Image (spheres, rainbow, N blue to C red):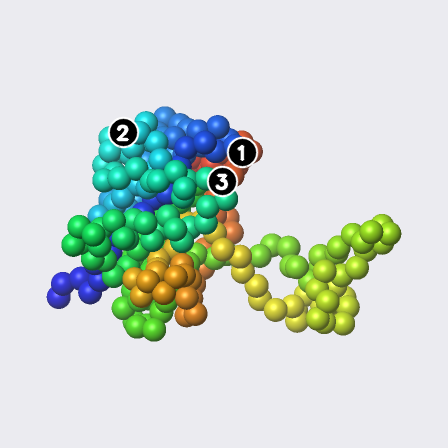
């Protein structure tokens, strides 16, 4: 049997990171950071096209050297610090629609998660196959610090429990705390319909749970050092 879904991988890699200069092309063990995500995508036979969305000719050239397609430069109005995922992904989808290339799924692979566990694309694809109502799939990991234990500082320098909807949630035994997760940057997979409807999530979001110890999201220099240490040890 053939593949059920035509699948586009989008790797967003704008220039101008403030937390870590040129983060997306910074060398990790001698390789530009974004190339790890490109190679991850290219290894999967479920991906029909691997595209880097960047606003930089320099980043585009590096991406092509690593095997990605860069058929466009991202417009300036969706390349700023405060731009969310949706316009970036939708821009890529619209570009290929205009060329007569239609994709059922879009896989978002952030360069800042270069050492993601193997098989995530395949797991997400299988979720969509088995659950036709899925709007999107995203990687999550179980939280280490429960928000019911969080406190908020008030103007008079006293503290109040951050969760207001439950009586003294900070005193609840660990065993009865709700099981909570937060999203990682490893992978998000969105259906075409979800994107057309104006969302990167939709209403039927299914998880791929990643072990906390396997999660590496690079935001700053300390995260980058942790990634370098991980590469050396593994």
Residue closest to the eye, 157 or 208: 157
Q: Residue at x 77, y 68 (%)?
A: 168
Above or below, comparing residue 217 to residue 194 in the picture: above
- State which tag comes first along the sequence, 3 or 2: 2
- For marks 3 and 1, the one nearer the N-term is 1
- Please name the residue that numbered disc 3 is placed on: 81
Asked which secondary structure carries label 3, the reply is loop
Q: Distance between the residues labelled 1 and 2?
A: 23 Å
Q: In this view, does 64 lie to the left or right of 1?
A: right
Residue behind mark 2: 61
Report x, y in % for residue 99. Answer: 17, 50
221 is higher (above) or lower (below) than 215: above
Q: Is residue 228 visible?
A: no
Circle 1 residue: 19
Q: Where is residue 24 in the image (x, y as percent from the top left)?
A: 41, 34
**Mark 3 to mark 2: distance in Å?**
22 Å
């Amino acid at each position: 049997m053939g593949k059920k879904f035509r699948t586009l991988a989008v790797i967003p890699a704008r220039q101008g990171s403030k937390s870590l200069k040129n983060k997306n092309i910074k060398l990790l063990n001698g390789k530009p950071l974004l190339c790890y995500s490109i190679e991850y995508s290219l290894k999967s036979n479920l991906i029909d096209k691997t595209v880097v969305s960047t606003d930089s000719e320099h980043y585009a050239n590096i991406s092509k050297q690593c095997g990605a397609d860069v058929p466009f430069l991202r417009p300036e109005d969706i390349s700023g610090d405060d731009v969310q995922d949706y316009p970036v992904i939708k821009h890529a989808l619209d570009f290929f629609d205009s060329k007569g290339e239609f994709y059922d799924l879009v896989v978002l692979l952030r360069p800042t998660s270069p050492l993601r566990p193997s098989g995530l694309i395949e797991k997400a694809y299988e979720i969509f196959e088995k659950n036709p109502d899925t709007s999107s799939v995203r990687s999550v990991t179980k939280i280490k610090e429960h928000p019911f234990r969080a406190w908020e500082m008030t103007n008079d320098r006293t503290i109040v429990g951050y969760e207001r909807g439950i009586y003294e949630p900070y005193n609840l035994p660990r065993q009865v705390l709700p099981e909570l997760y937060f999203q990682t940057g490893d992978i998000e997979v969105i259906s075409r319909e979800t994107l057309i409807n104006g969302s990167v999530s939709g209403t039927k979001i299914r998880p791929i749970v990643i072990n906390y110890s396997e999660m590496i999201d690079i935001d700053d220099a300390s995260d980058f050092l942790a990634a370098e240490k991980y590469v050396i040890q593994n």
